[in-house]
Image (cartoon, helix red, strand yellow):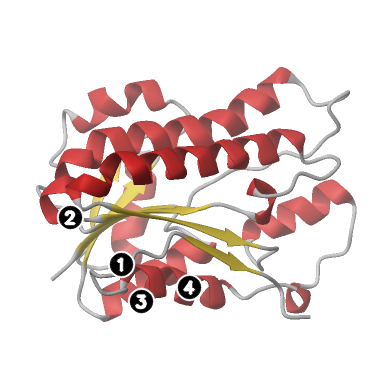
Amino acid sequence: MAAHLITGAGSGIGAVVAEHLAERGDDLWLLARDARRAAELRERFPGARTLVGDLSDPAKLSWAFGHQRLPVELDSLLHVAGVVELGTVGDLPVKAWLEQLTVNLAAPAELTRLLLPSLRLAKGHVLFVNSGAGLTAHANWSAYAASKHGLKALADSLRQEEHANGVRVTSVYPGRTATPMQVKVHQQEGKEYDAARWIEPESVAKAILTALDASRDAEITDITVRPGQ
């Protein structure tokens, strides 16, 4: 039975992936920002274990985990959580830059560092849900795209560093996906939101599971998922 730690399991892509893994009987470890959120996740995913740690303050993750039980062996670490704040370079305040670089980049780096011993024992898999913005930056997306370009660099470096330890690393680059984050993006853009125009979270989840389930003779390094319309 495989063990998976997932961030962002409360909604969108992370929730769909967690549902699939739970259905097939795998062990779930779900990261929550606080105790209340952890209780909500346990209610939604009976049998799942939770860890409390705030991705907006990664410097405290080590302290927080020091007071909790961690998985001894971890088959996958799935970085799905993220934040977005649009704006031009001329208008976006430093607070918005720091929040996105912290949650989308520094926190995954620190979380990975803390869990690498468990991943190495299981010859596990680190999967980063990146974004199309991690490959191409557009106007008004500078801070988010910078965080996601950095996440690509993190994944690429980690892949080379951990190859000898048997740890596989995958980046998934979804285009616009029908999630609560996409609703927020449309609000910031001042556009009407139509979920039917965008990728279903289920489609991205299938791509993630394909990478996780690849046989040990293969490592799927990068997956790009684009809207079909």
Q: What residue type is labelled 2?
A: Lys
Q: What residue type is labelled 1?
A: Phe
Residue 6 x %, y %: 35, 55
SS class, disc 2: loop
Q: Point out the tag, 3 or 4, that comes first from the N-terminus.
A: 3
Which numbered dot is residue 45?
A: 1
Residue 156 appearing in the image: yes
Q: Residue at x 64, y 59 (%)?
A: 180
Q: Residues within 10 Å of mark 1 (few under 14, many from 20)?
A: some
Q: Point out the tag, 3 or 2, that comes first from the N-terminus.
A: 3
Q: How far apart are marks 3 and 1 (CA)?
A: 11 Å
Pointer 2 residue: 123
Res 162 quadrant in image: top left
Q: Residue at x 68, y 70 (%)?
A: 226
Q: How far apart are marks 3 and 4 (CA)?
A: 12 Å
Residue 128 x %, y %: 45, 52
SS class, disc 4: helix
- Give the answer, above or below, for where 183 lies relative to 121: below
Q: Residue at x 44, y 59 (%)?
A: 221
Residue 54 x %, y %: 40, 34
Q: Which amino acid does label 3 sit on?
A: His
Pointer 3 residue: 20
Q: Residue at x 13, y 71 (%)?
A: 1
